[in-house]
Image (cartoon, rainbow, N blue to C red):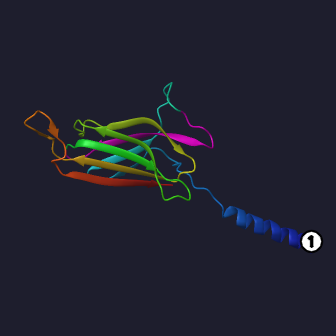
Amino acid sequence: MQKMLFSFLCIFCFVIGSSFTVHAFSPKHLPISQTSDRWKIEIKQPDKKTGLVTAKKDVFDTYGFEVQDIGKDAYHVTVEVFRNEPDSQTKYELFTSKKDHVLSKEVAFNHANFPISVQSDELEVIITWQEKPSRLLKDGQKDCESERKYKQTFTFKH
């Protein structure tokens, strides 16, 4: 009877314990990418150069990041990257980069190394851009707001 009770208890603990899993954003194979008709986003191995942040076990991992414009030239490109946090609807910014120059097929945006919490299981990339350059005003200033703005969102999940 004791063996049967012990066996039942072990199986019960195993079943209950195995249901509590943590899913961190940690792709098994890098690089991973997503592509639209306009953009290619790639998450890859981080640069290992001296002075750059390195992964800290059980705290955060590090990744490299690249955005390529595979459509027409884009102007005033903004790339924002966010991560989620367990039990929260709020997303946390990892970095934002604004490029006033033209992003084209020949010019890619790179972020050599960025950390992401091991608690996170989702990465969101938001890209906004304009398809035409800014108008030059009479006083020599640029009118960046006169052209239509576009947005695409990419989500990488564990």
Residue that protrudes farthest toward the front in the picture: 139
Res 133 quadrant in image: top left
**Closer-to-camera residue (35/114):** 114
Q: Is residue 126 left or right of residue 29?
A: left
Residue occupied by mark 1: 2
Q: Is residue 36 visible?
A: no
Residue that protrudes farthest toward the left in the picture: 138
Amino acid tagged 1: Gln
Q: Report the magenta residues as a range.
A: 54-72
Residue 1 in the magenta stretch? The answer is no
Q: Is residue 54 above or below residue 43?
A: above
Residue that protrudes farthest toward the top in the picture: 50
**Closer-to-camera residue (93/41):** 93
Q: Position of residue 72 (x, y in %)?
A: 19, 46
Q: Is residue 106 above or below residue 129?
A: above
Residue at (55%, 41%) from the top-left corner? Answer: 61
Q: Position of residue 77 (x, y in %)?
A: 27, 43
Q: Position of residue 119 (x, y in %)?
A: 57, 50
Residue at (87%, 73%) from the top-left corner? Answer: 4
Q: Is residue 30 left or right of residue 15?
A: left
Mark 1 nearby-residue class (10 Å; few <14, some 14–19, many ≥20): few
Q: Position of residue 146 (x, y in %)?
A: 15, 47
Q: Is residue 107 visible?
A: yes
Provide the secondary structure element on which disc 1 rests.
Answer: helix
The image shows a total of numbered marks equal to 1
**Closer-to-camera residue (114/45):** 114
Residue at (41%, 46%) from the top-left corner? Answer: 81
Indicate the quadrant containing the N terminus: top left, top right, bottom left or bottom right. bottom right
Residue at (66%, 61%) from the top-left corner? Answer: 20
